[in-house]
Image (cartoon, rainbow, N blue to C red):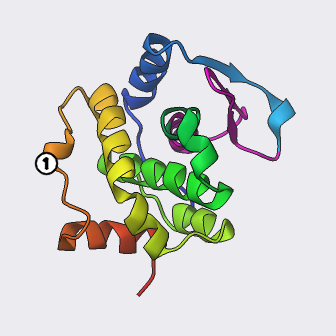
Amino acid sequence: MALTGDVGEHRDRLIAFLDSQNIALEYTENIAPALGVSYGGKIAILPGQSPAEELVTLVHELGHEYLHKSERRTMTTATVRETEAEAVAFIVGQAIGLEMGRASSDYIQMYAGNAALLAESLEVVQRTSAVILDAITGESATTQNAPSASSPEAQDTIDAIAEVA
């Protein structure tokens, strides 16, 4: 199932948020076959994506901007970085009502991510997702309301993303 759904004003709010964070946005075919690339202060997006795909790609790349463009990058592997960024994209996409299908699960598995890795990263994924959701919905999605990493709700999130039993 492809990524679908109505992005409403969320795309415009996300682009405004990028601007407020001094993150430049560029549309270019030079990044193909990648859908998006984060350069640290700049995100490049492949043109021609559906609105839902574009929004989720932007969120994924913004996840990289927040989580992996600092000293933390050297403490993580590509598997961790891609799993975390895609988990952020999944949570935000699902929270705003997009039909995520298997895209996130397939992407995470392509990078050898799994439920254990997601559980280890859940706190930073939730915190980053909350910041982005707050920016694009205008509603506070603070981590105070987020489940702890050991809660049943957190395990449901992990299972939904990784689609593991």
Secondary structure of residue under mark 1: helix
Tell me how many marks there are.
1
Residue 94 shown left or right of residue 75 in the figure: left
Q: Position of residue 162 (x, y in %)?
A: 47, 72
Residue denoted by label 1: 145
In what quadrant of the picture does the C terminus appear? bottom left
Q: Quadrant of the N terminus?
A: bottom right
- Picture layout, residue 53 above or below residue 120: above
Residue 127 drawn above or below residue 91 = above
Measured as percent of width and height from the top left, residue 143 is found at 21, 44
User: Which residues lie in the magenta part?
Assistant: 33-62
With 78 as the anchor, is 69 left or right in this view? Answer: left
Along the viewing direction, whichever of 153 and 14 lies nearer the viewer: 153
Image height of 82 relative to 53, above or below: below
Q: Is residue 109 visible?
A: yes
For the point 28% across and 72% down, which residue is it?
Answer: 156
| Horizontal arrangement in the rendering, residue 40 relative to residue 59 (left or right) | right
Outermost left residue: 145
- Residue located at (52% from left, 74% from top): 114
Judge by depth and name the residue closer to the eye, 158 or 15: 158
Q: Quadrant of residue 133?
A: top left
**Residue 1 seen in render:** no
In this rendering, the answer to whether 93 lies above or below 158 is above
Q: Is residue 137 magenta?
A: no
**Which amino acid is tagged 1?**
Asn
Name which quarter of the figure residue 28 lies in: top right
Residue 17: horizontal and vertical position, in percent?
Answer: 42, 19
Q: Residue at x 63, y 26 (%)?
A: 40
